Amino acid sequence: MAKREVDIVVLSDLHLGTYGCHATELLRYLKSIKPRAVILNGDIIDIWQFSKRYWPASHMMVIKHLTGLMAKDVPVYYIPGNHDEMLRRFRGFNLGPLKIVNKLSLKIDNKRVWVFHGDVFDVVMQNSRWLARLGAVGYDTLILINRLVNFISQKMGRGKLSFSKKVKNTVKSAVKFINDFEQTVCGIAAENQYDYVICGHIHHPEIKQVATKHGKVTYMNSGDWIENLTALEYNDSKWRIYSYNNDPVAQAIDLSKSKNTRQSSKDMMNSLLQELNMMQNKNEAPATELVAAGDRTL
């Protein structure tokens, strides 16, 4: 199958290691594209809720696919979020094409783009971290219940439901939080003369222009792989929201033919470590950067 070429892919809020993560669908998507650069914009591995008892092969296969891209010298930028915040202590770490940063300032086709996860603007995160963690557990439980209900609903010939989306759309405080989040982010972006700002965190895929007192900014959010199954793609000088649910090509990919599906988790881990070792050896020699330091140009 010919893979679809994409200049830049932005993924956020995968929450690998949780029951809610649609890792199989994500893997199909990744196998359907050939990206020139990948930005992982936070909450990739859910360290908050990580358990040794739950790490399916499909989750490991996503990690292995990403390291496979790195082995092919595809730049991967990892911006930690609140659920994988312990990786922020490794800010500035480079391993071949892999770079861990807290934010990215890019210049793409003469437009300035600011990329960061977004939890810094979450009042609950900043002032009541224990409440945020409790909410994360409650959200994951809601997703599990939602999956069970959808399984029964589909068996009965009915469509899928989304409990959390319904809650967000009907609770005024949740809608207000999303609007305030977008307005705050865009205000700061415009003040710093950015044309685009890209976030994750709130699990709400969006591309829209926002007016601020400092001018207009295009706000983008890559959504998540818990409910929306979305990403941001940049190709042919345009940004768009990718939706797995509207992609029959990715949905048709048969993962059973992949040799990784026949490997044990231990074998996959050994293979992963070998790839990381190869990247470390490559890193000892000067490498050609797709994205330069500072205000980065793709």
Image (cartoon, helix red, strand yellow):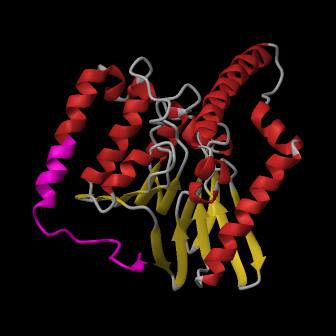
283 part of magenta stretch = yes
Instruction: Return the x and y of residue 21 as percentages of the image width and height.
Output: 55, 32
Question: Which quadrant of the rendered structure holds the C terminus?
Answer: bottom left
Q: Residue placed at 15% from the left, 45% from the top? A: 277
- The reply, left or right, for residue 211 in relation to residue 268 is right
- Where is residue 39, by image quadrant? bottom left
Q: Residue placed at 60% from the left, 70% from the top? A: 197
The answer to whether residue 207 is seen in the rendering is: no
Q: From the viewer's perspective, is residue 267 above or below residue 14?
A: above
Give the mark count.
0
Nearest to the observer: residue 14 or residue 248 = 14
Q: Residue placed at 67% from the left, 28% from the top? A: 138
The answer to whether residue 188 is seen in the rendering is: yes
- Residues drawn in magenta: 275-298
Instruction: Return the x and y of residue 265 as percentages of the image width and height.
Output: 31, 22
- Where is residue 240, by image quadrant? bottom right
Nearest to the observer: residue 252 or residue 144 = 144
47 part of magenta stretch = no
Instruction: Return the x and y of residue 133 as percentages of the image width and height.
Output: 58, 36
Which residue is at the far front?
127
Nearest to the observer: residue 23 or residue 32 = 23
Question: Which quadrant of the rendered structure holds the N terminus?
Answer: top left
